[in-house]
Image (cartoon, rainbow, N blue to C red):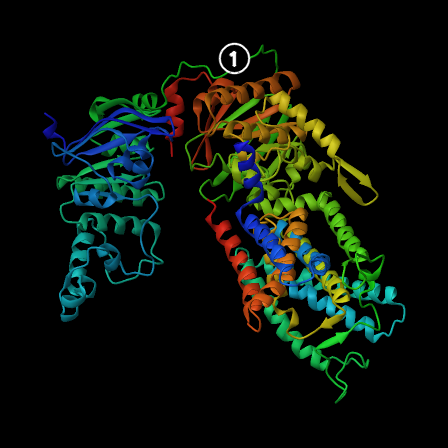
Amino acid sequence: MQEQIKKAYDNIGLPRLIIISFFVLMLVFAAPLGLNVASLLGDTLRRWAMYGILVLAMVPAIQSGIGPNFAISLGIVSGLLGATISIELGISNSWVAIGVAMLIGTVMGTILGILYGFLLNNVKGSEMTVSTYVGFSVIAFMNIMWLSLPFKDGNLIWPLGGSGMRNTISLSNTFGELLNKTWGFTIGQEGAGLYVPTGLILFFLFVCVIMWLFMRSKTGIALSAVGSSPTFTRSSGINVNKMRIIGTALSTALGAIGIITYAQSYGFLQLYNAPLWMGFHCVAAILIGGATTKRASIAQVIIGTFLFQGILAVALPVVNQLLPESNLPDVIRLIISNGIILYAISKTKGDK
Amino acid sequence: MSAQFLLNMQNISKEYDGNQVLKNVTLQVKPGEIHALIGENGAGKSTLMNILFGMPVIHATGGFEGTVEINGEQVSIDSPHQAIDFGIGMVHQEFMLIPGFTVTENIKIGREVSKPTLLSHIFGQELDFLELEKMAQDARKALATIGLNIEEYIKVAGLPVGYMQFIEIAREIDKTGIKLLVFDEPTAVLTESEAERLLEIMKKIAAKGIAIIFITHRLSEVMDYADSMTVLRDGELITRKEIKDTSTIEIAELMIGRKVEKLVDLAEDNRTFTDNSVALSLKGFHVEMPGERVRGIDLEIRKGEIFGIGGLAGQGKIGIPNGIMGLYKSQGTVEVFDKKLELSKLGNAMANAVSFVSEDRRGVGLLLDESIERNIVFSAIQIKNEYLHHLGPIKLLDQKKMRQHALEMIKLLDIRCTGPTQKVGSLSGGNQQKVCLARALTMNPDILIVSEPTRGIDIGAKKLVLEYLVKLNREQGLTIVVVSSELVELRSLCDRIAIVSGGKIATIIKPDAPDAEFGLAMAAG
């Protein structure tokens, strides 16, 4: 018995145990504080699926040995460009619109990812540092581009002045909540119950399955081996650098699809500095799921995203109730996301 | 009686994790004597020196048994610092010099001459003023002693390799009260003339009454320069002799030793070889593998034979298989059954049915955090497109076929594990080696190259692995090349053995040739 408990404990791991306990504790607190538990849970579910693909983008990066991809912003801006171009084209059918957005985003993400992969192959050993810089710089670069790209659509640009794009672009005319509302239903009272965004969840799981299949393909197996042991892979006649580029490109392309899925669920496209810290949240989520900076699995994506987003969705309103008008929720979010990254990195380096 | 020895290490025994590396070894050195310490790789020379220097690795693994006496007094040396206090110095094989510092600074580092200043009275010695002039003088003196004509104020970076070795020596003899100097293979990286000069200097130092322990593999140097010697083999003391009472042949014999244990029970042998059926041929083969450089090898390995490649560490034997597999840059031609390999193309050897079990099991040989089954089929998937479902352009892993094959291999090679999904990293060394072998065999090779097949595995697994190799050879006619540092191993299963020395083949001999022949070939460098 004791043995089994210890084994279960080893499997779950201390950080996850703490976070699960915290999550449950917050749920227990929520009801007496007058919060609607059902809607909190619905919120958790929605955030889980909308962030999921962005977190999934970490898998090919980590598995191919470039580590957590802090530069997922590259994929994010590709996705944002895809979405804005799709809006600019004025496609009326929202399914076609989101399809075009994803297509453009994926193509751009793949191209940028390949270029970025070449860069990473030249900085082996310091990928995490470089990817953080690249992640930040691409946002800064796009800040200039968002102001100067020749978009004309009224939904995109500032209403006054007529040039430069808005901070937040509403998607209500195009594909806002398109996936969420597909086969979506409410458990309990309409408007206050637990809303299940079936389409969104299905799409997230569908991408997970595709990714899972890819990881079992010849290329996927080789790609995973590169991250595990580049020398081993080389000895089996595999081009290590090529695999790393494939991993990076795939990660970036998934980032593009991820941000579009995120934006449609949120209902808005957020440009400029909004995606600045998204990379950190994605990295934190997968690490909470039990991944290391060297190994990650799809199950870890699913668990990690749920826990990370669950904490944010449930704990923040609870803390807000307990300590009204404080900055604490933001502080907590910072502590959780940065703390877990630090924890995971210290774990990787400590293993000898 | 022991007072006549400067250093007297008595009955030294040492275990690493239950593995006895030194058994009752005694080492005695007189003042002013050059004493050679001889033995194959793994004979226990480094461990003995680590004990002498009180290296932390010794104390972290449970200390040692036996006594150490210096000048007849029993001492305990717990740290390298203490060893220096006792007047013991070491000239390292790899230079421990700081490139950006001048010769003087390198010689005097840690023992700077300084005079107190106002600040140092308050804040301690760190703020003393350096007496550069005095330091330079000392450095010049030390350099003069060894006859090195070089300005003491130039930086070490960019000096020729030979000079660095001399500066290292100068640093040691500059230490006041130095009584014993250890030279760890000092001539290994030097040119012939440099080596000669170094050995002359060694003689000069000894003439001043400093005792020298001289570790080398070159028997000619021992004969010419040493006064006495201690031979170690497999952690045991073989003999202590005066050089004038021995000969090169005898030393070679003592070093190798006739080992009675037969590692393998050979199966019935009814093979025949012909010289015109060549499985693997190398012509003018060079490999740029750091530390194991191959400098031009011509070799023909016949179909169906077990061919051994031996030699001391660093002589290039490891470079040969790594070059053939394309893991390091190489030149020359390699032909597999008369088909020329494209050496620059990674995986080309594998595609031509040459399989390799690497000596670097954990780095090159295995994916430690993958399962046993994934490890076994990995190369077959990547090179031969086996164990896959082919759905048009998409190739997906065939779980069922992989599992089936893995189970067969586990049974065949007796891999002790909880099942085919166990992570390879959690297996013991011997079982890991069997997984490596299973992966190589899954490729259905015509030629199997195994490098250091028994390194770091226990005796039971050793026997099983070697016997399995013989079985493959006898039953399936597989041509096998075994690269190993352990001569016993090679001699118990190979048909012919090539000894590599200095990146070239010194000789090719039969396994039953006399010990001296092996010893001489290995020490030819």
Does A166 sit above or below residue B132? below
Q: Residues within 10 Å of mark 1 (few under 14, many from 20)?
A: few
Q: Which residue, given by chain and number where applicable, does mark 1 sit on?
A: B265
User: Closer to the camera, A160 or A245?
Assistant: A160
**Residue A118 visible in the current orientation:** no
Say which amino acid is labelled 1.
Asp
Q: Please state the chain letter of the residue tagged with numbered disc 1 in the rendered image.
A: B
Q: Residue at x 68, y 36 (%)?
A: B351
Tell me which residue sits at (75%, 84%) in the image.
A158
Q: Nearer the viewer, residue B472 or B342?
A: B472
Q: Residue furthest right?
A: A93
Image coordinates of residue A178 in percent, x first then y, are 83, 64
Label 1 secondary element:
loop
Q: How many marks?
A: 1
Front residue of B502 and A43: A43
Rendered-image quadrant of the C terminus of chain B? top left
Percent coordinates x, y for residue B422 in the rendering: 60, 33
Q: Is residue B12 above or below residue A181?
A: above
Q: Quadrant of residue A100?
A: bottom right
Is B331 on the left-hand or right-hand side of B181?
Answer: right
Q: Quadrant of residue B45?
A: top left
A159 with respect to B306 (left or right): right
B6 lies above or below A58: above
Residue B353 placed where, x, y %? 67, 32
For the residue pair A104 and A326, the one nearer the viewer reads as A326
Looking at the figure, which quarter contains the N terminus of chain B? Answer: top left
Report if residue B34 is visible in the image.
yes
x, y percentage for residue B39?
33, 28
